Amino acid sequence: MQGIQNKNVLITGASSGIGQAIAIRLAAEGANVAVNYYSDQSGAETTRAKIQTHYQQQQLTSAKTAIYQADVADRHAVNQMFSWMKQEFGSVDVLINNAGIQTESPSHETDADSFQKVLATNLNGTYFCAIEAIQGFLDRHYAGVIINVSSVHEIIPRPQYLSYAVSKGGVDSLTETLALEYAKHRIRVNAIGPGATKTPINDWSDEANKLDELAQHIPMGRVGTPEEMAAAVAFLISDEASYITGQTLFIDGGLTLYPS
Ligand code: NAD
């Protein structure tokens, strides 16, 4: 896709799942990809190795990738990560806010620390990274792009996952507000809203039953793949989406079409 090659892209939580698939897809499109991870260094190294394979296959000899450990919920660590990006890559041209966690418990039994932790990662982390990226875009008068990996649960309630649903509702508001505020600077801010996707965030220990149960609620009758999420991200950051801002693109096999 046009407009991705040679861009410096930072992807949070890219050591597994959707973040890893986005990293690999954007590398295949010729982007320079910085892989943020939190605790899974070996996953981040796997992402980096797969990226390098794509660079070699496509003879992208000047393309560059690197991994960086940071907790997106830590304001200072995020600031350090953006300083590192400037040193290593020269700039952040595209930010993908993908890092996320979830916890399951009856809402009235959820303790405050657990609630705060989900908000701190999913919402504060998205906010910390977004404002760092925007400051960099403004300093360079650069038409940068931010993609937030939200969820269908930014609009669909999710019993027993209160903190998760609240955090993604916040990400929706953050996406729209930043898009409106910085549109005059040609900065675009969009989100993807995945439906059920087979990644480590969900417990697949009882995989066959889980897939059956989920599929009953999905009009297309199956869960999504990380690669399908990554394809939408590639579109949204490309020149093909140059007039799209403030939107969440749901990639959910029709799940959000059900009346709530
Ligand atoms: P995943 O668990 O594979 O990915 C989440 C990543 O975030 C992991 O690599 C994890 O290490 C990282 N992370 C967690 N806390 C972090 C922190 N404090 N700092 C930096 N990184 C941190 O699961 P996934 O499904 O690929 O999730 C990616 C995103 O997709 C999340 O935001 C999630 O909410 C969203 N999502 C997933 C689904 C699904 O069904 N899998 C559906 C909708 C939305």
Image (cartoon, rainbow, N blue to C red):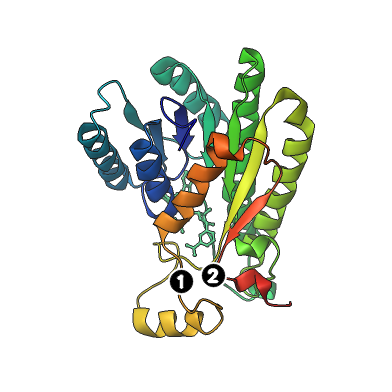
Element at label 1: loop
**237 is higher (above) or lower (below) than 91:** below
Q: Quadrant of the C terminus?
A: bottom right
**Front one among 131 and 92:** 92
Whether tag 1 and tag 2 are in contact, CB under 8 A, the answer is yes
Which disc, if any, is residue 253? 2
Query: Residue 28: in sight, yes or no?
Result: yes
Figure check: 29 above or below 208:
above
**What residue is pinned by disc 1?**
223
Q: Nearer the viewer, residue 77 or 135?
A: 135
Between 153 and 226, the one nearer to me in the picture: 226
From the viewer's perspective, is 224 left or right of 241? Answer: left
Image quarter of residue 102: bottom right
Ligand 1 neighbours mark 1 (CB distance < 8 Å): yes
- State the residue at coordinates (64%, 64%): 153
Instruction: Give, as a three-letter code, the residue at label 2.
Output: Gly
Residue type at numbered disc 1: Val
Question: In the image, residue 255 lies at what x, y percent?
Answer: 60, 72
Residue 129 visible, this angle: no
Give me the residue at 38% from left, 50% from top: 21
Note whether 53 is above or below 213 in the view shown. Answer: above
Query: Where's residue 118, x and y in %?
Result: 59, 55
Q: Position of residue 3 (x, y in %)?
A: 49, 30
Q: For the N terminus, which image quadrant?
A: top left
Q: Please tell me whether mark 1 or mark 2 is closer to you in this view.
A: 2
Spatial CA span between label 1 and label 2: 8 Å
Q: Secondary structure at mark 2?
A: loop
Please state the horizontal and vertical placement of residue 254, each as a whole percent of the image.
Answer: 59, 71
Residue at image coords 52%, 52%: 100
